[in-house]
Image: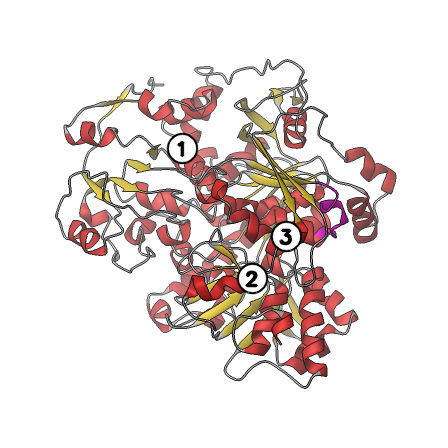
């Protein structure tokens, strides 16, 4: 096997993704720009902008045709990147935020791009880029060297990386690295960290370090931030948006007869595109995307049958298809994950399961294809940021407000949260029901975080006993607790009594402002809405249903219902949650208030179901977790709590329950 190259020649043009859309358009038309540090670059380019949801119906080199077509401003057309001869793409802060979709960097790579340079690069996007051989850097000094035609030493792209990540970059991707590892040409470093007080995540990771792959031996005395290794997973899952791409990689690398190792610890979900047919625009149908999207479910179902993997599929009621069994993240909490486990899934919101006290995080297609075969996933121990929540929330405030408040802080707006663990603790957290904790951990990824986690306690024990019929004593044995004296990168104390009802203005979940200041943020005292959406893994839990029902029941008592011209959608995170709402009498309350009920699916959150906008002028207030441009349609999306979503539907404008 050939040794890794020591230098790389970056060929092609350099595309600067400038805030000035005229300059961007001129580059796409053939004009080359010189590097100008004073020229503002677009920040927070999400994976939704790199490959919008509909582009992800493809999972081959077709993706190259649609690279960056979702970029705000609409200047990038089909084939613009591939046909432009670009070898480098340059942007601002937080490149690749949002979804864990590997289609995003893959579309760049297959467009001919060799290198992505940005002021900061999100953790999952960066790891996906490494896995497929797309180089990344935050060193803008490389630009002049590239323009001079200089061969760049590979060490420029591995500096600061852990040994495994550096070796993967040097070998051109994860599969090439693994081939070299199996051939004995490279070896992961042994973990030799001396015993030390560890954080919650560090303790879980230490217990999952693979020390002997042949014997399956796991566990070391301690790990510290920066330690890199392959860790043994307890749970691996994927959904129909990603399973087909992962399977194609799996077969290409392992062979057509390769089998999934221990399929009993692997799950698949049909949850993202269940309602796509209801909202797909004619233009996309004319492109053949309906048939292309349907293939995703077919390929996944065939894969699960051949491999003996459990598939949570679709549900029929009264002889009709009504939706999915569950959104994957809700079902992982309901039936699958346990405290102390290591959980990986092909979705950035896998971190939601951290509410159970497990280490749960999102991965891309290549990582999952590798994990199906090895049961392993590569991990670099992250630093942990601790949030101590104290005091009591005022009336009208819930965990969603707390998280929008946290995300709005300079630490996260400045990209300092990228790749960090967000550990939530304090007496206020342990007073929260599990569903509210899950809101916190779910949205850790919106901070650029590796994951979010909360130490399990009796609330978790009681939940698992009642939900799954587990033995309480056995559950308690799985609980992992941080050591006294553990080291944290930073600790933030938050007085919940000071947190107000919040909204995140359109464009980014980090755009949080107090609801009362919306006038200053939006330039108008009233933000009229067209759509109010209550659902998704974040906003479709049982406690969320309690909140929607409390506001709507009060409105109905006052003779009010959903405002004329407004559509209120309430979508359940799982069939179990729907049954809960039915038993509580909420379905009747929702109907009387004028809400439209939707069975489980990711739906509008992924622009694939009722609740999406179809016009740029439409305004949505939503309980989902992210509002990147184009995420839920062409309109503007404000993020808010279930309480504010329900109240806004009644008021016809963004409002708190007190205002109706």
Residue lying at 33% horizontally and 18% vertically, measured from the top left: 2
**Residue density around tag 2, few if under 14, some if 14–19, many if 20 or more, within 10 Å:** many
Marks 2 and 1 sit apart, C-alpha to C-alpha, by 35 Å
Which picture quadrant has residue 548?
bottom right
Proximity of marks 3 and 1: CB atoms separated by less than 8 Å:
no
Number of numbered callouts drawn: 3
**Residue density around tag 3, few if under 14, some if 14–19, many if 20 or more, within 10 Å:** few
Q: Which residue is identified by label 3?
A: 498
Assign the C terminus to one quadrant of the image: bottom right
Label 2, secondary structure: give it.
strand
Residue mark closest to the camera, 3 vs 1: 3
Marks 3 and 2 sit apart, C-alpha to C-alpha, by 17 Å
Q: Is residue 295 left or right of residue 283?
A: right
For marks 3 and 2 on the same chain, the one whose residue lies earlier in the sequence: 3
Question: Which region is colored magenta?
Answer: 426-434
Residue lying at 50% horizontally and 49% vertically, measured from the top left: 408
Residue lying at 66% horizontally and 57% vertically, measured from the top left: 398
Residue 346 appears in the rendering:
no
Residue 129, image x, y percentages = 39, 37
Would you place residue 66 above or below residue 651 in this image? above
Q: Which residue is identified by label 1?
A: 130
Residue 472, image x, y percentages = 86, 42
Label 3, secondary structure: give it.
helix
Q: Which residue is identified by label 2?
A: 640
Would you place residue 577 above or below residue 552 in this image? above
Q: Is residue 606 magenta?
A: no
């Amino acid at each position: 096997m050939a040794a890794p190259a020591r230098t790389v020649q970056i060929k092609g043009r350099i595309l600067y993704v400038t805030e000035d859309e005229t300059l961007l358009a001129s580059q796409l038309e053939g004009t080359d720009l010189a590097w100008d540090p004073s020229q503002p670059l677009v920040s927070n380019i999400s994976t939704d902008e790199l490959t919008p949801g509909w582009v992800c119906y493809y999972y081959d080199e077709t993706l190259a045709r649609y690279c960056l077509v979702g970029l705000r401003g609409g200047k990038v057309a089909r084939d613009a990147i591939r046909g432009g001869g670009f070898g480098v793409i340059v942007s601002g802060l937080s490149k690749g935020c949002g979804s864990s979709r590997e289609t995003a960097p893959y579309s760049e790579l297959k467009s001919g791009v060799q290198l992505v340079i940005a002021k900061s690069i999100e953790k999952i996007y960066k790891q996906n880029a490494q896995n497929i051989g797309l180089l990344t850097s935050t060193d803008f000094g490389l630009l002049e060297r590239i323009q001079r035609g200089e061969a760049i030493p590979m060490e420029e792209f591995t500096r600061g990386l852990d040994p495994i990540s550096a070796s993967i970059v040097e070998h051109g991707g994860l599969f090439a690295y693994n081939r070299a590892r199996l051939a004995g040409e490279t070896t992961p470093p042994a973990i030799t960290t001396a015993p030390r007080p560890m954080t919650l995540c560090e303790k879980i990771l230490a217990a999952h370090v693979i020390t002997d792959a042949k014997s399956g031996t796991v566990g070391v005395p301690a790990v510290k931030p920066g330690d890199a290794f392959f860790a043994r997973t307890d749970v691996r899952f994927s959904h129909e948006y990603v399973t087909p791409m992962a399977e194609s990689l799996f077969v290409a690398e392992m062979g057509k007869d390769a089998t999934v190792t221990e399929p009993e610890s692997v799950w698949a979900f049909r949850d993202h595109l269940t309602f796509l047919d209801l909202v797909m625009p004619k233009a996309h149908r004319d492109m053949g995307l309906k048939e292309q999207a349907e293939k995703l479910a077919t390929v996944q179902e065939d894969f699960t049958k051949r491999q003996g993997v459990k598939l949570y599929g679709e549900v029929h009621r009264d002889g009709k298809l009504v939706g999915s069994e569950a959104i994957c993240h809700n079902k992982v909490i309901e039936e699958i994950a346990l405290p102390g486990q290591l959980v990986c899934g092909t979705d950035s919101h896998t971190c939601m399961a951290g509410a159970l006290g497990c280490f749960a995080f999102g991965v891309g297609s290549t990582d999952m294809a590798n994990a199906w075969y090895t049961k392993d996933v590569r991990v670099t121990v992250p630093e942990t940021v601790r949030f101590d929540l104290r005091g009591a929330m005022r009336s009208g405030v819930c965990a969603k407000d707390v998280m929008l408040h946290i995300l709005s802080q300079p630490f996260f707006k400045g990209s300092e949260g990228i790749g960090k663990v967000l550990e939530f603790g304090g007496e206020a957290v342990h007073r929260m029901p599990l569903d509210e904790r899950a809101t916190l951990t779910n949205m850790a990824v919106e901070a650029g975080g590796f994951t979010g986690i909360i130490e399990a306690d009796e609330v978790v024990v009681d939940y698992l006993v009642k939900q799954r019929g587990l033995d309480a004593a056995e559950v308690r044995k799985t609980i992992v607790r941080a050591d006294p004296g553990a080291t944290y990168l930073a600790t933030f104390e938050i007085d919940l009594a000071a947190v107000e009802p919040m909204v995140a203005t359109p464009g980014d979940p980090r755009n949080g402002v107090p609801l009362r200041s919306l006038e200053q943020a939006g330039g108008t005292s009233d933000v009229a809405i067209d759509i109010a959406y209550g659902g998704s893994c974040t906003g479709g839990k049982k406690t969320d249903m309690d909140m929607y029902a409390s506001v709507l029941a009060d409105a109905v008592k006052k003779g009010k219902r959903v405002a004329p011209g407004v559509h209120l959608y309430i979508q359940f995170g799982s069939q179990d949650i729907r049954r809960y709402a039915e038993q509580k009498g909420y379905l009747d309350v929702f109907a009387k208030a004028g809400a439209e009920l939707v069975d489980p699916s990711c739906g509008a959150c992924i622009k694939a179901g009722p609740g999406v906008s179809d016009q740029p002028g439409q305004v949505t207030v939503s309980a989902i977790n992210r509002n990147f441009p184009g995420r839920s349609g062409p309109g503007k999306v404000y993020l808010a709590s279930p309480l504010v979503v329900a109240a806004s539907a009644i008021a016809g404008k963004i409002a708190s329950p007190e205002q109706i």
